[in-house]
Image (cartoon, grey):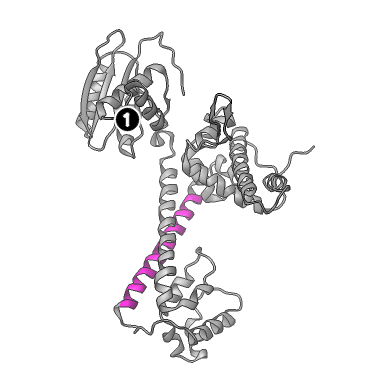
Amino acid sequence: MTAFDFTVSTLLVAIDISKHRHEVLIGVPGKKRRRRMTITNTLDDFQRLVAALSGYGLPVRIGFEATGNYHRALAHYLGQAGFELKLVSSVGLARTREALHNSWDKNDPKDAQVILHMLEIGAVQFFHDPLATGTADIQELSKTHEIVSRSKTELWHRILTHYLPLYFPEAERFHRSSRTDWFLAFLDKYPSPHMISAMSRQAFIADAWQVVGRKVAKERLLSDIYTTAAGSVGLPVGPDSDAVRMFRLVLAEGRSLIRQRNEIEARSVELLSGLPDYQLLTTIPGIGPINAMTILAEAGDLRRFRHHRQFLKFCGMDLATVQSGMVRGQSKISKYGNARLRRTLWMAGQTAALKKTNSFRDKFERYISKDRHNAHLRRKAYTAIAAKMARTVHAVVKHGEPYRPFFEG
């Protein structure tokens, strides 16, 4: 939260964002009556709002609640007009509305009143426009990569639970990694094991040699696949049947998603490899190109957090404790923060704990030394590792020094 100095008269503007129109409430210094405006999501109304606010001849501070992506265009336009922009927490807005009106009932004009009240008391946060700060491209790469990766995972589960049990149940054990598409290419050429067993062993090996890619002991792998196909219990569908056509359609979609993911990853490395912050982040164990891109996309410039506790709170990894009278609850992470950052740090911490000779693994081993098989203790250890990862990320970027596994002495 931010406290403001009101010795200088400032025009306070509250905007309740929606998809098609926005409710605007203007608080003029020295006047109790508030001016209301309703603007649509059009350029003409944006210009009308800027002209109305500029007409007061006062510094303008605008507060709004992030609503999907509907606030981005208006916020960018107002920021380019030179107005000060503040973000209102969704949780803070809901709690303040309930406290002021003693009801959970809500509507757009009421939300605008609450936002204006939060502006007056300084209960707002900073707003960073990704386009103005130069992180828009990184954000879009990161979010699109997540969308493509999730789509790939969902499609693979569909293949695993529907198509393979029908046509080639025994083929699942030959799949090793989702990073390559040779397995999908193989299924695309041989969707049914009966198409394999119809050939001789040598004919199949020669025909499938280029499909499986560069493999160690490729001939032994293909011989194993041939033997498995000969004893398969898959349904004997025809190679020209509609069932096989639908299977191949899904496989083609999976291969397309893999190509898209690889293109995004190559572009992200090309875009970020020259950035000093990216180079510093990739020196930390567990943080590769994608994790580094996600951190930069979601957190922006980490130097704006003066202390690592501010960054922990931004991630939702700060400790929160419920206390009433003599009763004090257990301290847990609040989870009131950026969920993508929290998940990225958690995954990076798990990867770092599996590597050798680094402070993350050392901390993890010390944490679980009392009972290595206690699942609850291991979960707490991973949470502690994720918090340490957040502190390390902030320190490495803020001080401009690469990660060191251990400090001497």
Q: Quadrant of the C terminus?
A: top right
Relative height, residue 52 to residue 166 (above, below): above
Residue at x-position 63% and y-position 33%: 399
Percent x, y of residue 325: 55, 24
Residue 228 in sight here:
yes
- Which residue, given by chain and number where applicable, does mark 1 sit on? 104
As drawn, the residue found furthest toward the front would be 326
Residue 211 in sight here:
no
Percent x, y of residue 165: 43, 75
**Residue 373, picture quadrant:** bottom right
Q: Which residues are magenta?
A: 243-269
Of residues 111 and 240, the one nearer the viewer is 111
**Residue 158, picture quadrant:** bottom left
Of residues 276 and 350, the one nearer the viewer is 350
Relative height, residue 192 to residue 142 (above, below): below
Local crowd size for mark 1, using a 10 Å CA cut-off: few (<14), some (14–19), many (≥20): few
Percent x, y of residue 183: 48, 72
